[in-house]
Image (cartoon, helix red, strand yellow):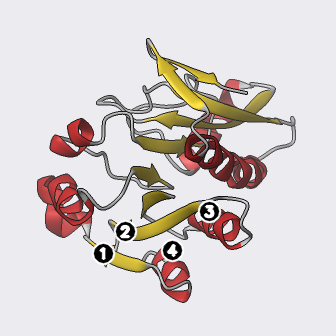
């Protein structure tokens, strides 16, 4: 069974989508750890309610030691790392030791509205301002760049003329809650093949 560590920074709604998929037996995996880089992240409460081991390493306190601290907890204990609304950037040894085994969900259709400084509501504000007619979310592998790793899957939503960033954010979040468990299911079933920076989904 695939063992994962889920890294969060906020409410943990994407974490909840994974928990729900595991509890319903739709997803055959074990959430071994939930780790937050913020002291007041509600996602920690979600994890504790489900008996999942939790850690809080506040980024203001750990700073450049954050990635190494997370690695010290999870190394040789999990198969994959899932970034589910995790706002810190992983650096150093953790990227090498978990190469090809870290995924992230981003609230846009990468390569649009991503990269440094593009997170949370800012992504949707940028989409609205640009006038795009379609947005969505992307699950991708994590590499040394920001939102630059190979794309596993994407889900789309329409962008309406009347939309505010908040309205678009809610619509995209619904798709995030489908996309992340779906990607994990594909990975757990060995249906994700990575070749030359491109992902093939096996039948």
Q: CA distance from mark 4 to mark 3?
A: 12 Å
- Residue 203 makes an appearance in the image: yes
Q: Which type of secondary structure does the marked residue at label 2 adopt? A: strand
Q: Residue 36 shows which numbered tag? A: 2
* Eye-nearest disc, 2 or 3: 3
Q: CA distance from mark 1 to mark 4?
A: 11 Å
Give whichever of discs 4 and 2 has the lower sequence position: 2
Task: Name the residue that disc number 3 marks.
Answer: 18
Residue beneath the point at 64% across and 48% down: 185
Task: Name the residue that disc number 4 marks.
Answer: 43
Q: Residues within 10 Å of mark 2 (few under 14, many from 20)?
A: many
Q: Residue furthest left?
A: 65
Q: CA distance from mark 2 to mark 3?
A: 16 Å
Task: Tell whether 165 sits left or right of 120.
Answer: right
Q: Residue 56 shows which numbered tag? A: 1
Q: Residues within 10 Å of mark 3 (few under 14, many from 20)?
A: many
Residue beneath the point at 28% across and 46% down: 90
């Amino acid at each position: 069974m695939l063992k994962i560590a889920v890294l969060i920074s906020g409410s943990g709604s994407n974490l909840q989508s994974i928990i729900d998929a595991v509890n319903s037996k739709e997803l055959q995996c074990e959430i071994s750890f939930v780790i937050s880089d913020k002291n007041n992240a509600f996602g920690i409460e979600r994890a504790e309610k489900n008996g999942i081991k939790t850690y809080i390493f506040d980024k203001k306190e750990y700073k450049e030691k954050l990635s190494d601290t997370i690695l010290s907890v999870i190394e040789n204990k999990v198969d994959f790392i899932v970034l589910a609304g995790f706002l810190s950037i992983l650096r150093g040894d953790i990227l090498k030791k978990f190469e090809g085994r870290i995924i992230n969900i981003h609230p846009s259709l990468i390569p649009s509205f991503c990269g440094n400084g593009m997170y949370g509501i800012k992504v949707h504000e940028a989409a609205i301002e640009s006038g795009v007619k379609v947005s969505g979310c992307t699950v991708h592998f994590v590499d040394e760049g920001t939102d630059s790793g190979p794309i596993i899957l994407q889900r789309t939503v329409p962008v309406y003329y009347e939309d505010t960033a908040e309205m678009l954010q809610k619509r995209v979040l619904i798709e995030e809650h489908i996309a992340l468990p779906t990607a994990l299911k594909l990975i757990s079933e060995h249906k994700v093949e990575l070749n030359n920076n491109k992902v093939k989904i096996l039948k």
